[in-house]
């Protein structure tokens, strides 16, 4: 976990004032349940140590100034006239401010310094962390509160409407509502999202994150394409499948494999495979939750491996390089399972292993992966952490 204190000094250097609050917004890694949050599915994320920090203070002007140490740039947003859409990370900030104002919050001018150790582009949800950090800092400094569920919803809307990514609810929920030492089991049914928590076993079990150093690109089009394919597949399934109450199915949650197979004649092969990933992944998460409750890591690991295969072969969001990294990690003695995590097309592999196996995973990654690709894949051993927190700086 990074020490945010040097950021306080850099805030003073940059803005010439004392900050009054520091927000820590963690990244997340999803253990299983990929590309199902926008399909009424269930997901199992945890918040991690790596986080984005927003060090902030009030200003007398009606302007929000945000300096990002990640990008080394500053954006300024006038609270009375938001101005033309911003590019890059500024779009997220603009979206969050618009969302807070739409909730009726009277925002005050603030200055924010963003920094931390959560890398962008690794698929660890740096954009949701940035949005949550800005939202919580703005609310605190405007003497306002909102339920965390509403903050999560407005972060998702910011991402959809301002950054153009039609994402689901998982990332802001994981960032804002995770609990120390517990895995979130998030039910993503629209307008009815709800989280349960499963205690993480003490001691010896490690979650490893291995960053392939091939950045994932969500807005590159594949993500939006998958969202549209799922909508189309569901429409075709709904036309011919009834749920257990005899009603036409309306969400993927009500689609069984038998029902999908009946609808297969109305879909081309690619569309059928997209839907097969969604239906099978939701079933895997439900089984994985039971396995975790029973501390059955062998089963959990097998489900992670199956999830990867499905994401790669049916959903088409892996890459030869991610497949290779997952295979290398999976082959290390002791490792229970490994899969790509997050949106895909690059990013990180997540693995489940006994803590004692971690040094070996790292050395195998160094010799079998780094050498071939000329990179140093970062390897993190993480534990489930608490969601975003607001800490006054004492000045
Ligand atoms: C990204 C999105 C999430 C989710 C994952 C894939 O992280 O922001 O909503 O869809 O991809 O599981």
Image (cartoon, rainbow, N blue to C red):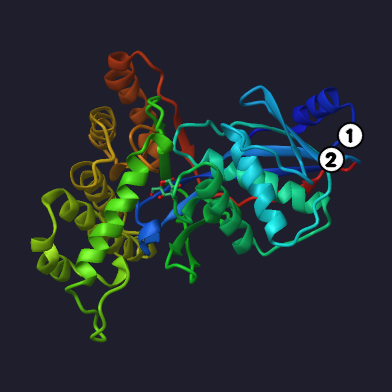
User: Which residue is located at x 85 percent, y 43 percent?
Assistant: 62
User: Which residue is located at x 35 percent, y 60 percent?
Assistant: 39
Residue 202 visible somewhere in the drawing: no
Disc 2 crowd rating (10 Å Cα; few below 14, some 14-19, many 20+) is many
Up/down of 270 relative to 217, above or below:
below
Q: Residue 126 at x, y = what percent?
A: 54, 38
Q: Is residue 243 left or right of residue 86?
A: left
Q: Residue 44 at x, y = what percent?
A: 42, 56
Quarter holding the N terminus is top right
Q: Residue 134 at x, y = what percent?
A: 69, 44
Is disc 2 in contact with disc 1, using a CB cutoff of under 8 Å?
Answer: yes
Q: Quadrant of residue 178?
A: bottom right
Quarter holding the C terminus is top right
Q: Which residue is mark 1?
A: 18
Up/down of 28 relative to 201, above or below:
above
Q: Which mark is residue 223?
A: none
C-alpha gap between disc 2 and disc 1: 7 Å
2 or 1: tag closer to the N-terminus: 1
Secondary structure under tag 1 reads loop
User: Which residue is located at x 20 percent, y 67 percent?
Assistant: 237
Label 2 beta carbon less than 8 Å to ligand 1: no
User: Which residue is located at x 31 percent, y 69 percent?
Assistant: 253
Disc 1 crowd rating (10 Å Cα; few below 14, some 14-19, many 20+) is some
Q: Residue 184 at x, y = what percent?
A: 48, 59
Q: Which mark is residue 57?
A: 2
Q: Is residue 50 left or right of residue 258?
A: right
Up/down of 42 relative to 134, above or below:
below
Residue 270 visible somewhere in the drawing: yes
Toward the viewer: 84 or 168? 84
């Amino acid at each position: 976990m990074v020490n945010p204190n040097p950021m306080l000094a850099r805030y003073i250097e940059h803005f010439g004032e004392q900050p009054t609050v520091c927000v820590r917004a963690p990244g997340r890694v999803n253990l299983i349940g990929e590309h199902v949050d926008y399909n009424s599915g269930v997901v199992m994320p945890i918040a991690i140590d790596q986080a984005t920090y927003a060090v902030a203070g009030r200003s007398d002007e009606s302007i929000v100034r945000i300096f990002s140490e990640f990008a080394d740039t500053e954006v300024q947003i006038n609270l009375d006239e938001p101005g033309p859409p911003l590019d890059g990370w500024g779009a997220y900030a603009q979206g969050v401010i618009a969302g807070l104002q739409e909730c009726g919050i009277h925002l005050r001018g603030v200055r924010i310094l963003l920094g931390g150790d959560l890398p962008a582009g690794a698929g660890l949800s740096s954009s949701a962390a940035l949005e949550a950090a800005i939202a919580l800092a703005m609310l605190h400094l405007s003497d306002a509160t909102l339920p965390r569920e509403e903050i999560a919803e407005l972060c998702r809307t910011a991402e959809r409407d301002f950054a153009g990514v039609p994402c689901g609810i998982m990332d802001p929920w994981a960032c804002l509502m995770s609990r120390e030492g517990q895995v979130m089991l998030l039910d993503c049914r629209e307008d009815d999202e709800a989280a349960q928590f499963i205690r993480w076993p003490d001691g010896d079990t490690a979650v490893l994150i291995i960053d392939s150093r091939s950045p994932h690109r969500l807005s590159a089009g594949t993500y939006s394409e998958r969202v549209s394919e799922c909508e189309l597949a569901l429409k075709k399934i709904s036309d011919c499948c009834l749920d257990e109450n005899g009603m036409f199915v309306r969400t993927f949650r009500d689609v069984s494999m038998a029902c999908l197979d009946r609808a297969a004649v109305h879909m081309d092969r690619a569309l059928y495979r997209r839907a097969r990933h969604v239906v099978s992944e939701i079933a895997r998460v439900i089984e994985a939750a039971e396995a975790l409750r029973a501390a059955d890591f062998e089963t959990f690991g097998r489900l992670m491996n199956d999830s990867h295969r499905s994401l790669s072969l049916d959903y088409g969001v892996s890459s030869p390089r991610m497949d290779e990294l997952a295979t290398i990690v999976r082959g290390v003695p002791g490792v229970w399972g490994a899969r790509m995590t997050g949106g895909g097309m690059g990013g990180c592999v997540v693995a489940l292993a006994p803590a004692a196996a971690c040094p070996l995973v790292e050395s195998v990654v160094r010799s079998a992966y780094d050498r071939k690709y000329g990179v140093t894949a970062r390897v993190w051993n993480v534990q489930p952490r608490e969601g975003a927190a607001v800490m006054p700086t004492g000045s």
